[in-house]
Amino acid sequence: MADKSSANAYWAANIKIILISLAIWFACSFGLGIILRPALEGIHVGGADLGFWFAQNGSIYVFLILIFVYAKMMGKIDRDHGVDE
Amino acid sequence: MDQFTLNLIVVGFTFAIYIGIAIWARAGTTAEFYAAGQGVHPVLNGMATGADWMSAASFISMAGIIALAPAGGYQQSAFLMGWTGGYVLLALLLAPYLRKFGKFTVPEFIGDRFYSGTARLVAVICLIVISVTYVIGQMRGVGVTFSRFLEVSTDTGLYIGATIVFAYAVLGGMKGITYTQVAQYVVLIIAYTIPAIFISLALTGNFLPQLGLIGSYAPSGGEVSMLAKLDSLVTELGFTAYTADTTNMFNMFLFTMSLMIGTAGLPHVIIRFFTVPKVADARSSAGWALVFIALLYTVAPAVGAMARLNLTTTFWPGGATGTALSEPALSLADIESKPELAWINTWKATGLLDFADKNGDGMIQYFNEPKAVADANAALGTATKALADAGADADKAALEAAVIEATTARDAALAEAKLGDKSLAELGLVGNELTKVDNDIMVLANPEIAALPGWVIALVAAGGLAAALSTAAGLLLAISSAVSHDLIKGSLNPNISEKGELMAARISMGVAIAVATWLGLNPPGFAAQVVALAFGLAAATIFPALMMGIFSKRINKMGAILGMLSGLVFTAVYIFLYLGWFFVPGTNVYANVPANYFFGISPLSIGTIGAVVNFVVAYVVSMATQAPPQHVVELVESIRVPKGAGKAQAH
């Protein structure tokens, strides 16, 4: 890429989305699924407590949504910065 | 038609498909052999990645590992989150950039980015250790599945499996492997979900097993949830509650993290993302891979919980509507006579399930033997055996006295130990009579327990084989491309022609299959433990090196090499301290029990700390030494933008 500042702006936008996504990734699995489970014992998803459900099923759904949203947002940023293929 | 013929037809049919694909998808160039010509649709690549990733262990063992864990099913959630969450890291941190880099192997990126043949070599060594340890388990899986369903010996099964893999991997390379993996995924997911749907319908009335997991328990009128019912039954029988919280949250955290970053650092998974046409496809393909993996991984915990509940109420018929001990246990006469219980004897014959009527009451009581009772029973067994084995000149009187003493001690333990509000002695129990339940039976016996037709059982056989074969092929490709592309082309003979390299790749593949088959026939005694090493090493070496190579322009050659080596040595040494030096039994420094772990960190979880060591060493060393040259900085800048990925280059 010729324009250095545009490249930097693109990369900064990418890093920002990655950090937000990783925060969600961490919060649903390590947060709700492990660390916060004892504190959230009273909340239920059907017949399971919230932490158990996130650990065995919920976090996987969040991971899925996360990857597709990331791919979509990056597609838009690629086009905005003119670096798409 | 009998079950054996049916199994043979279904498995034979799937094998014919794989061979057909092999002939159709022959590779003509190295680009096709290493990366399927970079023309694989992202959804198909996702499917192939799913099959590549889900091994015999995921298909056959995982539900049982969760269901039968002594510490409860919740603690095993580390596998579920770890083996899926790694794909988020792949999509966000590695796959798109490595696809943009546009070459064929993981060591090649490390060698170019860190401008060093040594770095490339270290990466090749890590890759081969990781992939070879993994492939041993897959080859065993092929052999074992054959022997269970097709009445051949494990070794014969292994030879048949190796021949099939040879046909499509040597002919088609990545191209052949990718399209067979797509077919294998379809076979394995159908085989996994059909029995799961039926068991979910029977136990919870829910068609989707994912809803069944959080649904209510149908046989008791739907007033209790399935998990609450399971918890109450297993705790009544002295087991830890299924949903019990972990006793070591820190270790569960590290173990989950280790599996996640290990997953993202496994070379045979990473190279799958080299096969798609564009950078954007690499991102979405990771999502599709997780869709196909999630179809099995969200069902597995439901299968585990339901199969455990089913097992418990089978042996305690009263448990279905009341408490387990409200009615007598399953009788031997019922096992022999009732057709719906025929599976118990079928699987007893395979050695995966075993029972013994220890108290001679004609019933099989399944419960968790308290440790004091188990120890007392073991002592009594030893004393009884000593008396039985005693020669003519032995002191019979002393041995008989020892047996009487051990019996008294055992009876005291039985009077002491309680199940519910009664002691074991009052209940007339002497020990747990369901003496063996193998993890694998939770999946393998499911179709029979749910009384499904024979073709479903045959499909499970084909599914187990598909899972093992697809993973083995993916691993073998990662090994052979590292040998032909990184070792031969990259250092031994850089001037080799395209045709020569393709031949070298095929020969490496053949040799890799031969070595894997030999290792499968003569498995080292430590095959189970080395999986920990594979994940730990991938987490501590390859993942940090790749990530730093993409996200930092400052990490240099020395930093990367020393970082990888310290991650490697740190992780391997910690594992060896507990499992023996190079896994040689008896050479371990500490006994492999939680009391001995540093800060409670098990050898399975150490990869996370190894990765931290790698990051810190690489950073400190890089800061103290010269920055990378300009052409490397330009390389990093170019892989960060998707534009201009195009076709991969051999150079």
Image (spheres, rainbow, N blue to C red):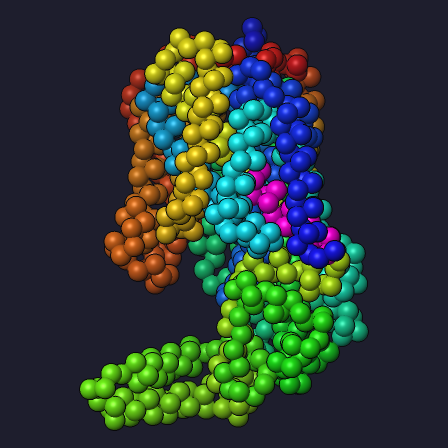
Task: Specify the quadrant of the image occupied by residue B110.
Answer: top left
- State the residue in front, B560 or B391: B391
Position above or below: B373 against B605 = below
Residue B183 in the image: above or below residue B312: above
Residue that protrudes farthest toward the top in the picture: A2
Residue B521 sits above or below residue B489 on the image: below
Does the rendering let one see residue B2?
A: yes
Residue B632 vertical placement versus B190 (above, below): above
Residue that protrudes farthest toward the left in the picture: B393
In depth, the one of B162 and B279 nearer the eye is B162
Give residue B227's position: percent from left, percent from top: 66, 66
Could you tell me if residue B539 is visible in this image? Answer: no
Q: Which residues are magenta?
A: B454-470
Instruction: Give the quarter of the figure containing the N terminus of chain B.
Output: bottom right
Residue name at image x 73 percent, y 78 percent: B321
Res B85 quadrant in image: top right
